Image: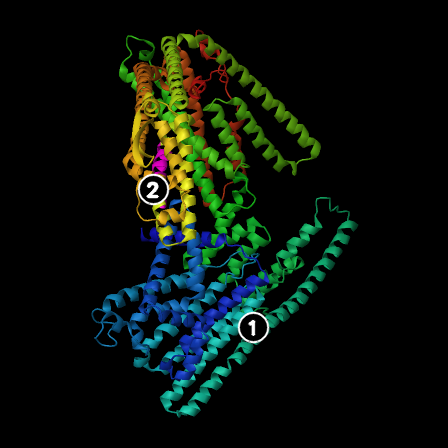
């Protein structure tokens, strides 16, 4: 049980990493290489900063210089001046927890096959590139901030931040321990995640242009362990001395450098060179830390100046170390090339001897009359010899008594053979493939137990030589002890299996390059489509299974529960059709060239949707796709003849099916008036009533709108009711302004201000003219009797200066307004001298001066009250218009509401009952019960056969898959299964049985014993 769970976990983890790295597109361009170099440089500077710690004896000046070369440290230092330093711990913790959560979520999606959400994989890919490759060392330092006070003098410490006033460094006491314990757990989880990711994120295909090869993980995980040790082991320096800590780090860096030189793990030689230089620098920094800590422990050269100069010298040697690393990698590569050149010479000599031997044998055979025949393919024989390298095998006996065995070996170790084969392939010369096979087989002969060589042989045979048989044989030999292999080797086998499965699925899916996401999407989609398709057929079969019973064809024995059972079945049928149509249509968007999908959809369209014409078009499309594949294998004339034959057979089957369907449609047209004819007439009559009521409703609403718009809301009515109110109020204000300006004229006259006097006089004239014009406009637009009476008949008396005394005169309102404006204009012509005179009797002043007195006397007494009364009358007129419009709207709304209620009454009275009887399910039930029991039985048997065939196909596919998982099956069995499963070539059944309901169907052929329910189920 535990072993199965472990296998499930491994499979999920492998699948997650495979899917995450599969979609990465690597363009081997200078820009991409510069990006890789920059990432490596940023990573190295962080490691250098960690190894040059003051705890190892480095001075403050050296530590400062090294820290300031690290761009990540510089950025975080600047951020620490803005936000507290412990915020970095919170950010790192959230990043790690988010990454782990996203990893588990993506693993869950992969395990359940939910491939519709791709963002977790994209997010995980970005987080891995950032947190594992670029900022790994800095993130660990951020996570260790709660305990950083134990090895650093940075202030303020985390303990000071969380507990002001307490001790400077108390990470394991309250309240600091509340952050320290989760920090340890998060750090362990992050380190584990980073190591596993570094171990497994690589490309297994030898032909890949991505920089990470299958050996990259083994070296990168060692380098990650060195980075972890440089960050964590410093906490133990007080217990085991800093010399021991730096010694461990130095030994680890040397092991990483040796592994890099042994494997040259990257596909790109330039990246191998740069990585070699970086690892050499790491080794030198680790050695420098060991030397500095040793000198501090032995108290050698510890005066400040000498100590600083020694450390500057050690740091100054870093460029030399970098160049030394480049030199070592280049020398290793040159040594491999020299070894390959020597091996190539031996191989060419061996090939020349083989060709000479073949020539001698051929001449001997010709002399003895032996015909080689045209079937002997020399190129194939040569390829076989070159790829199976004639290397004499060594037994334990011969090896023991051969003192020159080691000198005869081409490769000292299996890793050397593995690296040599990869270097030869990286030259990207297709002519070297035979020699590459010889190198690989030579390594296998000399080191048969090397797992690297075994896996390289599998990948070479699978991806380079395309020899699936030999690859499968090699896989079986390795899979026998798969659990004893390292985790990365198991991952390689997993990837090879996945790519093999994807390659084999190209024909069924219809894509040229099938990815794991395509395979998952295809598998999940086609499975859902088949389930829905089978469910639809099962529902139709159940429908006719019920109708076989005698009770459904006898009205006296039929119970309401029986009809309800049929309705439930038809509800399920409708849902299954909807689901299957959606799944098929969504699959056709991305996999329209899949013949399997097209044939399944054609059967669904024919058997369920009853669209034979569309089904034949889909089958023809699938047939053309298959013919495109077989055209390359068959000759031109033979292929064309076969295609014409298939088209003729397909067209004849299609025409027979269409003829049968046409007959049944004509028969349905003759009997449809008898099925639910009364209910249909009631619905038609209701439809006419609703149309008439809607016409009346629209007519009434339109008429009311036109009347209100043309009678009450016209521009003239708006002017008379709204604008005149506003303008009349303005005229009233003009009278008050004129009186005020006359007063200003008097004040200006007494002040002898001629400009002010002239300005006020002109304003009074303007006011008089405006009052007169507005008064005439109002008189021209008298809309009501009250206004006409007010303007024409109402008498107004006011006092006028005549012959030195005041006399009363009577006018109607129209003449009063005209006279008032005239008097106002006359008052504006008074001179400045007249207004400066002292008070005098009315008989001693001029007419203009008397007019000024008239204006002052009558403005507030008569003019303002009269115009206020006029505004009131206009407002009353507007109110009457508003009441009329409101009444009209209420009447129209009431009529419309009555029409709507009347329409709703008819609809609610007739429609629900009619719809229940006329809907698809009731119609199908009535139609099915109208057929004879024999017809129902034949239809049931037909769909039962279709369902049985689909289940058999599913069982056979599962069996084929199971046999394939166990190592394949014989070709004869596969051909037999394919021959028995060719149900797609069966022509679609005719549905002429329903046209002959009265006759017995026993004498009909199987193609004629066909259902009618698909005609009805498709809504016809």
**In the figure, 668 relative to 337: above or below?**
above
Residue 280 percent location from the top left of the image: 50, 76
- Main secondary structure type of the part rendered in magenta: helix
Residue 488: x percent and y percent?
45, 60
Could you tell whether 89 is left or right of 329 in the image?
left
Q: Nearer the viewer, residue 157 or 625?
A: 157
The residue segment tinted magenta is 725-741
Residue 421: x and y, percent?
58, 63
Near mark 1 (Cα within 10 A), the count class, few <14, some 14-19 or many ≥20, is many
Mark number, residue 329 = 1
Residue holding disc 2: 844
Q: Secondary structure at mark 2?
A: helix
Looking at the picture, how far across and down is residue 58, in whole percent? Answer: 40, 83
Of the image marks 1 and 2, the number of the one nearer the N terminus: 1
Foreground of the two, 332 or 468 = 332
Instruction: Kindly identify the residue that appears in the image at 27 percent across and 36 percent down.
Output: 861
**Point 29% across, 70% down: residue:** 146
The one of 977 and 730 positioned closer to us in this rendering: 730
Residue 717 sits above or below residue 863 on the image? above
Foreground: disc 1 or disc 2: 2
Q: Residue at (46%, 51%) from the top-left corner?
A: 19
* Residue at image location 49% in from the left, 73% down from the top: 279
Q: Are marks 1 and 2 in contact (CB under 8 Å)?
A: no
Residue at disc 1, secondary structure: helix
């Amino acid at each position: 049980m535990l072993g199965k769970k472990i296998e499930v976990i491994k499979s999920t983890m492998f699948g997650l990493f495979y899917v995450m790295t599969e979609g990465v597109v690597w363009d081997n361009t200078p820009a991409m290489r510069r990006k890789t170099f920059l990432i490596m440089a940023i990573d190295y500077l962080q490691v250098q900063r960690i190894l040059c710690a003051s705890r190892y004896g480095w001075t403050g000046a050296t530590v400062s210089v090294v820290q300031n070369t690290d761009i990540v440290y510089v950025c975080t230092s600047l951020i620490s001046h803005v936000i507290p330093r412990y915020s970095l711990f919170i950010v790192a913790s959230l990043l790690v927890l988010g990454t782990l959560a996203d990893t588990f979520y993506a693993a869950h999606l992969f395990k359940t096959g939910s491939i519709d959400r791709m963002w977790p994989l994209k997010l995980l890919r970005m987080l891995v590139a950032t947190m594992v490759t670029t900022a790994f060392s800095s993130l660990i330092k951020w996570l260790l901030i709660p305990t950083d006070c134990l090895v650093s003098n940075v202030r303020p410490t985390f303990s000071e931040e969380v507990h002001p006033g307490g001790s400077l460094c108390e990470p394991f006491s309250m309240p600091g321990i509340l952050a320290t314990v989760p920090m340890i757990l998060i750090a362990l989880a992050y380190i584990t995640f980073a190591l596993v990711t570094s171990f497994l994120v690589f490309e297994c295909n030898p032909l890949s242009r991505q920089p990470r090869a299958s050996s990259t993980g083994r070296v990168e995980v060692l380098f990650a362990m060195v980075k972890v040790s440089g960050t964590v082991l410093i906490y133990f320096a007080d217990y085991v001395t800093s010399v021991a800590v730096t010694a461990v780090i130095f030994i680890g860096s040397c092991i990483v450098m040796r592994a890099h030189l042994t494997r040259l793990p990257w596909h790109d030689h330039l990246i191998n060179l740069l990585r070699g230089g970086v690892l050499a620098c790491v080794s030198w920094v680790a050695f420098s830390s060991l030397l500095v800590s040793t000198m501090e422990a032995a108290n050698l050269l510890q005066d400040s100046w000498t100590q600083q100069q020694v450390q500057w010298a050690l740091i100054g040697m870093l460029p030399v170390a970098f160049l030394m690393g480049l030199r070592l990698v280049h020398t290793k590569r040159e040594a491999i090339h020299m070894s390959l050149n020597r091996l190539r010479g031996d191989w060419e000599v061996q090939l020349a001897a083989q060709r000479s031997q073949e020539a001698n044998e051929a001449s001997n055979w010709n002399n003895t009359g032996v015909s080689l025949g045209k079937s002997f393919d020399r190129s194939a024989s040569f390829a076989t010899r070159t790829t199976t390298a004639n290397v004499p095998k060594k037994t334990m006996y011969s090896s023991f008594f051969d003192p020159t065995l080691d000198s005869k070996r081409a490769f000292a170790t299996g890793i050397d053979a593995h690296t040599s084969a990869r270097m030869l392939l990286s030259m990207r010369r297709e002519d070297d493939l035979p020699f590459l096979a010889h190198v690989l087989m030579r390594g296998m002969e000399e080191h048969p137990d090397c797992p690297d060589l075994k896996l390289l042989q599998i990948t070479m045979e699978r991806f380079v030589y395309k020899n699936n048989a030999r690859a499968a044989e090699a896989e079986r030999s390795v899979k026998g002890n798969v659990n004893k292999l390292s985790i990365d080797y198991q991952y390689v086998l997993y990837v090879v299996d996945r790519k093999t499965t994807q390659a084999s699925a190209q024909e069924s899916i219809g894509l040229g390059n099938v990815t794991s996401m395509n395979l998952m999407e295809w598998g999940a989609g086609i499975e859902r489509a088949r389930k829905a398709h089978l469910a639809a057929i099962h529902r139709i079969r159940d429908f006719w299974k019920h109708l076989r019973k005698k009770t459904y064809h006898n009205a006296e024995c039929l119970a309401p529960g029986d009809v309800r059972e049929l309705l439930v079945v038809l509800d399920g049928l409708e849902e299954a059709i909807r689901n299957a149509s959606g799944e098929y249509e969504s699959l056709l968007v991305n996999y329209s060239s899949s013949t399997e999908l097209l044939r399944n959809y054609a059967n669904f369209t024919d058997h369920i949707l009853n669209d034979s014409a569309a089904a034949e078009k889909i089958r023809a499309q699938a047939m053309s796709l298959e013919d495109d594949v077989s055209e390359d294998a068959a000759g031109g004339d033979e292929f064309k003849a076969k295609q014409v034959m298939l088209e003729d057979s397909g067209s004849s089957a299609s025409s027979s099916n269409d003829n049968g369907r046409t007959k049944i449609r004509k028969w349905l047209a003759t009997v449809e008036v008898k099925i639910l004819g009364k209910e249909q007439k009631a619905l038609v009559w209701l439809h006419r009533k609703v149309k008439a009521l809607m016409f009346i409703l629209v007519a009434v609403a339109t008429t009311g709108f036109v009347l209100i718009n043309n009678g009450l809301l016209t521009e003239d009515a708006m002017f008379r009711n709204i604008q005149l109110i506003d303008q009349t109020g303005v005229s009233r204000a003009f009278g008050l302004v004129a009186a005020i300006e006359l007063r200003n004229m008097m004040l200006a006259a007494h002040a002898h201000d001629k400009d002010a006097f002239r300005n006020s006089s002109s304003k009074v004239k303007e006011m008089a003219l405006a009052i007169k014009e507005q008064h005439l406009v109002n008189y021209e637009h008298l809309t009501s009797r009250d206004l006409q009476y007010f303007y024409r008949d109402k008498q107004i008396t006011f006092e006028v200066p005549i012959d030195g005394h005041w006399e009363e005169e009577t006018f109607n309102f129209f003449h009063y307004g005209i006279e008032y404006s005239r008097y106002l204009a006359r008052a504006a012509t008074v001179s400045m001298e007249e207004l400066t005179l002292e008070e005098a009797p009315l008989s001693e002043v001029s007419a203009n001066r008397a007019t000024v007195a008239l204006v002052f006397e009558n403005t507030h007494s008569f003019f303002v009250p009269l115009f206020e009364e006029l505004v009131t009358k206009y407002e009353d007129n507007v109110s009457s218009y508003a009441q009329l419009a409101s009444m009209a709207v209420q009447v129209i709304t009431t009529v419309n509401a009555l029409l709507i209620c009347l329409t709703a009454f008819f609809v609610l009275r007739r429609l629900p009952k009619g719809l229940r009887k006329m809907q698809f399910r009731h119609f199908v039930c009535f139609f099915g019960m109208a057929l004879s029991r024999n017809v129902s039985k034949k239809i049931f048997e037909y769909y039962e056969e279709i369902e049985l065939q689909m289940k058999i196909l599913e069982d056979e596919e599962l069996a084929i898959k199971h046999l394939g998982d166990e190592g394949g099956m014989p070709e004869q069995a596969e051909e037999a299964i394919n021959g028995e499963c060719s149900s797609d070539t069966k022509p679609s059944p005719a549905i002429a049985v329903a046209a002959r309901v009265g006759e017995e169907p026993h004498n009909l052929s199987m193609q004629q014993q066909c259902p009618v329910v698909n005609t009805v189920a498709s809504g016809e």
